[in-house]
Image (cartoon, grey):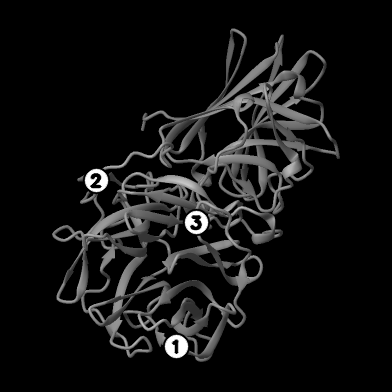
């Protein structure tokens, strides 16, 4: 028996979808305007997860240019059938709904096959027992629409040989209640002669929920479950520690037990900087319907999973990460860039470090600035970067950024003032407006400078260390604005390194080390 600690994948890992193949389990998440797209996780116990790659790891697979931070890749669904893995998904920035495939999920995935006529978002794929394959998606009601968020779930047969929809589409469901908002993210399962459709309702915010309906025919009519929603936290009040629960997907183990993964948020004092995270719950079937965490009816901190405990080599959830770039041959799968990066701007140099070419795109632009980072996974953490002093130049900024979006972030900026002086600035951006919080002149700097960013919930502080000198640049920075509640969107924060130049240059900054560690202080 293994014990899961929720969230099983903390930080910005929203819209989970899962499938089981024998005693292996695979899980994917949305990535929006980050590259590479769609991290793929592997587990053998549903408790411990390891990232084995990214589904969309080539520029040709994932056009993101010009998209807003919360556009791009929406709600992937992963399924396995007859030796092939399928991920079906929406690129909200360009192309619409598509399918990619792989025989081994850790190997390169195919180029996307875009589905003509597949309007809307959040599709899934269903393989029936008779060999037929179906597309299930969400699209808004256009004629006679009474309110924003009024949608239909629709089904159409799918020809996988030619990657196209075939036959006629049919609207089959519009939600579990009258005037329900945003019925979306459908998944279809077959059990005991019924087609069960599970979906998210209420919008991916405080009113989020998981609901269920069923039918003897895939085309309906679908019967509403009288106990809907089968999972929600919207009735527990604004101060409950886990909010926004919804967008679930089911998996059955070889022994016939069922579990659900779903997203939820963990705000602090009503504000969420981590984004939507991946949680798990136990499911049993009673009277032909699923019951989530029976006897409790909500998410719990711990979940007993009736599988043998498994330990991955590199867990997706770690309290401490240390990167000595000069010793690395490649960056890990967990590193992300913004939109479609120019990979020539990034280079691992053996014995030296990670070189970032100073780019002309600022973090405020809906472009691909020179930025590479990892997801924030803890409310309280410390991130540190060591920069080689001789790679800091005039009219160029570099340092650490805590990034919610191009409109909301906190950054440190090192720039050279004179041959003997380096300036450190701390800048908070809110609604695309940058505000200078601190400016310090550093003198007698030797070969290296360490920048330390410490976050305690909704406040942050910055220190700079070089030689025997340690300087508090600024403390008690209010970062409420880096929350979903203020900044909006569907993402959580990432933290990483950036390099910006006010003019075209081929100069590069070298980072020796980068570290991220939970401080457990809040």
Residue 48 to residue 150: above or below: above
Residue 242 position within the rendered picture, expressed as x and y whole percent measured from the top left: 32, 51
372 left or right, relative to 220: right
- The image quarter in which residue 284 lies: bottom left
Residue at figure coordinates x 42%, y 65% from the top left: 80
Observer able to see residue 219: yes
Query: Depth check: 474 or 445 in front?
Result: 445
Residue 216 position within the rendered picture, expressed as x and y whole percent measured from the top left: 28, 87
The residue carrying pointer 1 sits among few (fewer than 14), some (14 to 19) or many (20 or more) residues within 10 Å by Cα, namely some
User: Looking at the rendering, in which quadrant would you find the C terminus?
Assistant: top left
Residue 170 position within the rendered picture, expressed as x and y whole percent measured from the top left: 46, 89
Residue at figure coordinates x 37%, y 29% from the top left: 521
Residue 483 to residue 388: above or below: below
Residue 32 to residue 186: above or below: above
- Circle 2 — which element? loop
Residue 104 numbered tag: 3
Q: Which residue is mark 2?
A: 308
Which of the two labelled residues, at mark 2 and mark 3, occupies the earlier sequence position? 3
In space, the residues marked 3 and 1 are separated at their CA atoms by: 34 Å
Q: Which residue is mark 1?
A: 171
User: Looking at the rendering, in which quadrant would you find the N terminus?
Assistant: top left
Which of the two labelled residues, at mark 2 and mark 1, occupies the earlier sequence position? 1
Residue at figure coordinates x 44%, y 50% from the top left: 41
Residue 257 numbered tag: none
- The image quarter in which residue 67 lies: bottom right
The residue carrying pointer 3 sits among few (fewer than 14), some (14 to 19) or many (20 or more) residues within 10 Å by Cα, namely few
């Amino acid at each position: 028996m293994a014990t899961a600690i929720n969230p099983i994948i903390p930080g910005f890992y929203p819209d989970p979808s899962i499938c089981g193949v024998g005693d292996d389990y695979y899980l994917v998440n949305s990535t929006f305007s980050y590259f590479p797209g769609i991290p793929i996780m592997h587990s053998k116990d549903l408790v411990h997860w390891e990232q084995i790659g990214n589904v969309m790891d080539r520029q040709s697979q994932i056009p993101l240019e010009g998209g807003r931070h919360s556009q791009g890749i929406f709600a992937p669904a992963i399924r396995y059938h007859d030796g092939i893995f399928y991920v079906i998904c929406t690129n909200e920035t360009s192309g619409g709904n598509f399918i990619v495939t792989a025989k081994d999920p850790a190997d390169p995935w195919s180029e996307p096959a875009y589905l003509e006529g597949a309007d809307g978002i959040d599709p899934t794929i269903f393989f029936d027992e008779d060999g037929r394959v179906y597309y299930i998606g969400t699209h808004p009601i256009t004629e006679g629409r009474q309110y924003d968020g009024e949608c239909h779930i629709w089904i159409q047969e799918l020809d996988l040989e030619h990657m196209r929809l075939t036959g006629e589409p049919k609207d089959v469901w519009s939600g579990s209640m009258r005037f329900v908002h945003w019925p979306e993210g459908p998944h279809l399962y077959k059990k005991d002669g019924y087609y069960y459709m599970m979906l998210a309702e209420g919008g991916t915010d405080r009113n989020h929920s998981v609901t269920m309906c069923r039918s003897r025919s895939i085309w309906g009519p679908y019967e509403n479950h009288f106990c809907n929603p089968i999972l929600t936290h919207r009735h527990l009040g604004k101060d409950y520690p886990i909010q926004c629960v919804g967008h679930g997907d089911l998996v059955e183990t070889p022994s016939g037990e069922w579990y659900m993964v779903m997203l939820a948020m963990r705000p602090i004092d009503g504000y969420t900087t981590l984004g939507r995270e991946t949680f798990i719950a136990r499911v049993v079937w009673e009277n032909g319907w699923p019951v989530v965490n029976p006897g409790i009816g909500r998410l719990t901190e711990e979940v007993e999973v009736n599988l043998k405990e498994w330990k991955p080599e590199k867990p997706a959830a770690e309290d401490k990460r240390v990167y000595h770039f000069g010793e690395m041959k490649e960056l890990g799968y967990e590193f992300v860039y913004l939109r479609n990066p120019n990979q020539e701007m990034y280079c691992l140099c053996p014995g030296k470090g990670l070189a970032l070419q100073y780019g002309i795109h600022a973090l405020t632009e809906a472009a691909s600035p020179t930025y590479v980072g990892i997801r924030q996974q803890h409310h309280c953490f410390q991130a540190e970067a060591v920069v080689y002093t001789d790679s800091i130049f005039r009219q160029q900024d570099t340092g650490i950024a805590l990034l919610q979006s191009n409109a909301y972030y906190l950054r440190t900026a090192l720039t050279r003032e004179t041959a003997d002086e380096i300036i450190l600035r701390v800048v908070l951006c809110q609604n695309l407006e940058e505000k200078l919080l601190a400016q310090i002149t550093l003198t007698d700097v030797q070969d290296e400078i360490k920048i330390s960013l410490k976050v305690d919930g909704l406040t942050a502080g910055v220190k700079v260390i070089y030689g025997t000198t340690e300087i508090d640049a600024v403390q008690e920075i209010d970062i409420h604005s880096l929350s979903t509640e203020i900044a909006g969107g569907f993402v959580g924060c990432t933290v990483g390194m950036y390099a910006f130049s006010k003019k075209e240059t081929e100069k590069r900054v070298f980072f020796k080390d980068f570290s991220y560690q939970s401080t457990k202080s809040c």
